[in-house]
Structure formats: structure tokens, C-alpha cells
């Protein structure tokens, strides 16, 4: 049976918010170049859309990490499946993530990237679930703060499905 998905943010709302974020980031990094690090696979749609809305020079790299455990519960132990293609020494890095939930993944990742000699490392996430936080993470740019619900679409999956939905929805599991 198909899962029931209710719309949380429409495609128009998501695109409008990403445009605003791009404008803010462009202002903040005026006169600099920005190295975007998208986290596979969830942040790909967001990273590409955001990159198009940034007016300072942008370079792009991707990293793939996973936390041990099943797909809906974060264990806190993070594994790098695919590292960056290029070194980040001296660069202003902006990590682009789909969602910050417990904070386990990002707290590990930011710590890991900060040790690589970059000029700066900041974090930009499309969605943020502060209620669920277990580890403190400094989020520099948040698209939307959301309640404790399991969301899909715009890159986010449920058992690898629904990443291609152009909107963000809540999977109704009850
Ligand atoms: P963390 O708990 O470490 O902050 O989040 C790790 C990862 O869990 C996120 O990058 C994302 O892939 C996944 N995740 C957390 N909450 C959700 C959610 O509501 N929906 C989906 N599809 N993935 C989520």
C-alpha cells in the first residue's frame, strides 16, 4: 500500500526560502569565495538549488557519511563512506545538510572538517529539528525549524523512496 504523505512545505515555499538563504549567504561572504560541501544523498537537491542562488564564486564537493544503526535511528557513531575529492585547506567551507536531527552526524562531521586547516567551517541546513537534539551543534543557516516528525522529499528519503518529491512532506505512520 502507498504511504500517506501530507505536505509540510510546498515546492514554492521551499524554493522561496532557498532563494532567501542564498541572498543572505551571498551577503555574508561578500568579497570571498565559498566551498560548498553537500552531504550525500539527502542534501543533493538542496545543495544544487542553493548553489544557484549564491552570487559569490562557488566550488562544490560532496561527502557521504552514515551512522551505524537503522535508517530512522541515529546511533552517534559515524562512518565516512565517501570523503571529499579535494583538500579544504585555506577555504571558507559551508557544509550543506538536509536536516539536523539528533546532531550526532553533524557534530562528528564539523569536528572532522575543522581539523583539516580550512579558513572557516559553517553549517547550513534546510531543516532543523531542535527538539530532538542530543549533541549541541552550531547551525549558522536554517531553512525551516520543524517539529519532531519524520519528513521526506526534496532529497530526504524513507527507505530510499520519495527523495524526488519537489515538496517536503510528513509520512503518516500512525
Ligand atoms: P542526526 O540525527 O545525526 O542529526 O541526523 C542524521 C541523518 O538522519 C540526517 O542527515 C538524515 O539523513 C536523517 N534524518 C533525520 N531526521 C530525518 C527525517 O525526518 N526524515 C528523513 N528522511 N531523514 C531524517
Image (tube, rainbow, N blue to C red):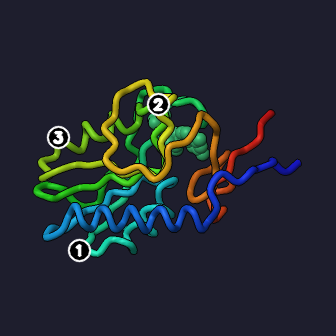
Which residue is depicted at the point 41% across and 36% down? 105
Question: Is there a contact, CB below 8 Å, between mark 2 and mark 1?
Answer: no
**Which residue matches tag 2?**
102
**Which residue matches tag 3?**
115
Q: Is residue 14 left or right of 100 when viewed as pictured? A: right
Q: Is mark 1 within 8 Å of ligand 1?
A: no
Where's residue 96, x and y in %? 38, 54
Q: Is residue 157 left or right of 52 when viewed as pictured? A: right
Reading the chain from its start, which is encountered first: label 1 or label 3?
1
Is the residue marked by circle 2 packed among few (<14), some (14-19), or many (20+) residues within 10 Å?
A: many
**Which residue matches tag 1?**
57
Q: Relative to residue 172, is residue 126 depicted above or below? A: below
Q: Is residue 163 visible?
A: yes
- Helix, strand or loop under label 3: loop
Q: Nearer the viewer, residue 167 or 59?
A: 167
Which residue is depicted at the point 50% across and 49% down? 144
Where's residue 82, x and y in %? 38, 51
Q: Is mark 2 within 8 Å of ligand 1?
A: yes
- Helix, strand or loop under label 1: loop
Q: Can residue 67 be seen in this view?
A: no
Quadrant in which residue 165 is drawn: bottom right
Reading the chain from its start, which is encountered first: label 2 or label 1?
1
Where's residue 95, x and y in %? 32, 52
The alpha-carbon separation of the residues under discs 1 and 3 comes to 24 Å
Question: Is there a contact, CB below 8 Å, between mark 1 and mark 3?
Answer: no
Which residue is depicted at the point 55% across and 42% down? 146
Q: Which of 47 and 128 is in front in this view?
A: 128
Which residue is depicted at the point 38% across and 26% down? 135
The alpha-carbon separation of the residues under discs 3 and 2 comes to 22 Å
Reading the chain from its start, which is encountered first: label 3 or label 2?
2
Amino acid at each position: 500500500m502507498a504511504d500517506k504523505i501530507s505536505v509540510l512545505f510546498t515546492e514554492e515555499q521551499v524554493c522561496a526560502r532557498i532563494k532567501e538563504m542564498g541572498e543572505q549567504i551571498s551577503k555574508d561572504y561578500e568579497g570571498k569565495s565559498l566551498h560548498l560541501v553537500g552531504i550525500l544523498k539527502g542534501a543533493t537537491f538542496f545543495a544544487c538549488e542553493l548553489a544557484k542562488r549564491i552570487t559569490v564564486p562557488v566550488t562544490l564537493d560532496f561527502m557521504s557519511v552514515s551512522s551505524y544503526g537503522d535508517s530512522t535511528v541515529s546511533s552517534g557513531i559515524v562512518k565516512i563512506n565517501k570523503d571529499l575529492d579535494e583538500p579544504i585547506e585555506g577555504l571558507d567551507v559551508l557544509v550543506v545538510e538536509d536536516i539536523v536531527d539528533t546532531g550526532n552526524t553533524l557534530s562528528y562531521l564539523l569536528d572532522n572538517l575543522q581539523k583539516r586547516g580550512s579558513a572557516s567551517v559553517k553549517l547550513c541546513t534546510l531543516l532543523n529539528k531542535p527538539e530532538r537534539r542530543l549533541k549541541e551543534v552550531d547551525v549558522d543557516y536554517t531553512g525551516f525549524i520543524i517539529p519532531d516528525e519524520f519528513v521526506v522529499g526534496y532529497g530526504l528519503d524513507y527507505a530510499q523512496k520519495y527523495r524526488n518529491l519537489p515538496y517536503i512532506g510528513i509520512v503518516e505512520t500512525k
